[in-house]
Image (cartoon, rainbow, N blue to C red):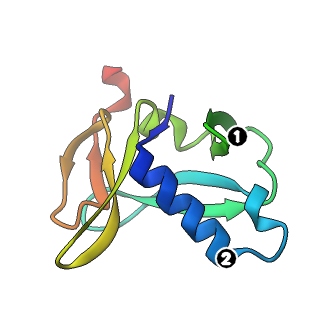
Amino acid sequence: MISLSRAALSEVKRLQRRCSDGNSLNAILRLGVQSGGCSDFYYTLEFVAAPAVGDRLWQCEDLQVAVDAHSLPYLNGLTVDYSEDLMGGGFRFDNPNAEQHCGCGNSFKAIELSKH
């Protein structure tokens, strides 16, 4: 399961309105991981009109969240938060599948999947 804090949900909604082309307000937030970053993986967030084949879907209030099958083992149990500080605002990721995070907070080294 993936969860978003109230602050993260509010920021996602703000970004949806900002990016709105008339249809984007009903867009799905797609979360994923890609190889790279300061550690092994980095998080990806994008708005899509429809889920891809094989995506797992969650409902967070009135927002639909999708995660692709490849990313799911790395993101299961993830909590996304949003906060602002003197350096600006950003999403924060609390990932039980990460054994190490880099300083930027957007990249992580995953626990070996065989340990799950």
Observer-nearest residue: 76 or 91?
91
Q: Is residue 108 left or right of residue 17?
A: left
Observer-nearest residue: 93 or 54?
93
Q: How many other residues sit within 10 Å of disc 2, few (<14), some (14-19) or many (≥20)?
A: few
Label 1: state its secondary structure: loop
The residue identified by callout 2 is 19
The x and y percentages for residue 47 are 67, 63
Disc 1 or 2, which lies upstream in sequence?
A: 2
- State how far apart marks 1 and 2 are (Cα): 23 Å
Label 2: state its secondary structure: helix
Q: How many other residues sit within 10 Å of disc 1, few (<14), some (14-19) or many (≥20)?
A: some
- Mark closer to the observer (1, 2): 2
The x and y percentages for residue 112 are 31, 33
Observer-nearest residue: 102 or 61?
61
The x and y percentages for residue 70 are 57, 42
Q: In the picture, residue 27 is in which quadrant?
A: bottom right
The x and y percentages for residue 39 are 26, 59
Residue displayed at 43% across by 53% down: 8
The residue identified by callout 1 is 55
**Tag count:** 2
Residue displayed at 57% across by 69% down: 15
Give the amino acid at mark 2: Cys
Give the position of the C terminus as an image quadrant.
top left
Give the amino acid at mark 1: Asp
Q: Is residue 92 above or below residue 1?
A: below
